[in-house]
Image (spheres, grey):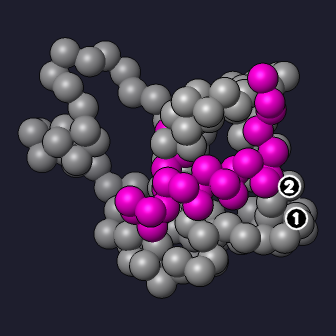
Amino acid sequence: MRVLTSDLLVAAVTELSKGSRLVRARDVVAWCEYNGVDAQGDGFKDQALWEADHDEARGRHRLLKFRSGESRQSRMGWALVAHGARAREAAAQLGWGEQCWSGEAWDWLSGGPPVPTRRYGAAAHEEQGGCPTTEGTSPG
């Protein structure tokens, strides 16, 4: 099985962005499973995914990165640079912020992480795409 690389991450985002300009991490992981690519790697959960993300940001910079906050539980996604305006609109609707690699760390382009909004009730459940009988959700 191939381990996820920056080139494969870009390939996943390219393929997945045909349906949505902002591609979530959980969709990339599903793409990897479907295509026989190891997003886990050695080490922590989804270690290969995070390494591919850093390699891409340090290298050719073909992707934009968005997050819903700073915590480990925050959602994350990418977009092709060419789809920047539409991806930024989609991220803004979700309350996500854009990050950029400074060479040493990920910086928030807006100066700080987005303030998470709490959503309660059926509307929040429908937005997350959850099922009433499903326990737990995967990050991404």
**Magenta segment boundaries in residue numbering:** 1-26
- Residue furthest to the left in view is 122
Residue 60 x, y percent position in the rendering = 84, 70
Give the class, few, some or many, for how many residues have Cα within 10 Å of label 1's Cα (few <14, many ≥20).
Answer: some
Horizontal side of residue 31 vs 127, given as left or right: right
Residue 98 seen in the figure:
yes
Residue at 75% across / 62% down in the picture?
106
Label 2 crowd bin: few (<14), some (14–19), many (20+), radius 10 Å: some
Q: Nearer the viewer, residue 72 or 41?
A: 41
Residue indicated by mark 1:
58
| Residue at 28% over, 42% down | 128
Q: Give the CA distance from mark 1 to mark 2.
A: 5 Å
Q: Is residue 101 left or right of residue 133?
A: right
Q: Could you tell me the amino acid type at mark 2? A: Asp
Residue 124 on the magenta segment: no
Say which quadrant the N terminus sits in.
top right
Identify the residue at image location x=80%, y=32%: 3
Q: Is residue 11 found inside the magenta-colored segment of the image?
A: yes
Element at label 2: helix
- In the picture, the disc for residue 126 is none
Residue 102 position in % (x across, y down) = 83, 71
The answer to whether 61 is drawn above or below residue 11 in the figure is below
Can you give x and y, in whole percent of width and height, for residue 45 in the image? Answer: 69, 25
The answer to which image quadrant residue 42 occupies is top right
- Number of marks drawn: 2
Asked if the residue under mark 2 is in contact with the one under mark 1, i.e. CB atoms within 8 Å, the reply is yes
* Point 46% across, 29% down: residue: 138
Front in this rendered view, residue 47 or 31:
31
Q: Is residue 95 visible?
A: no
Task: Name the quadrant containing residue 5.
Answer: top right
Amino acid beneath label 1? Arg
Residue of label 2? 55
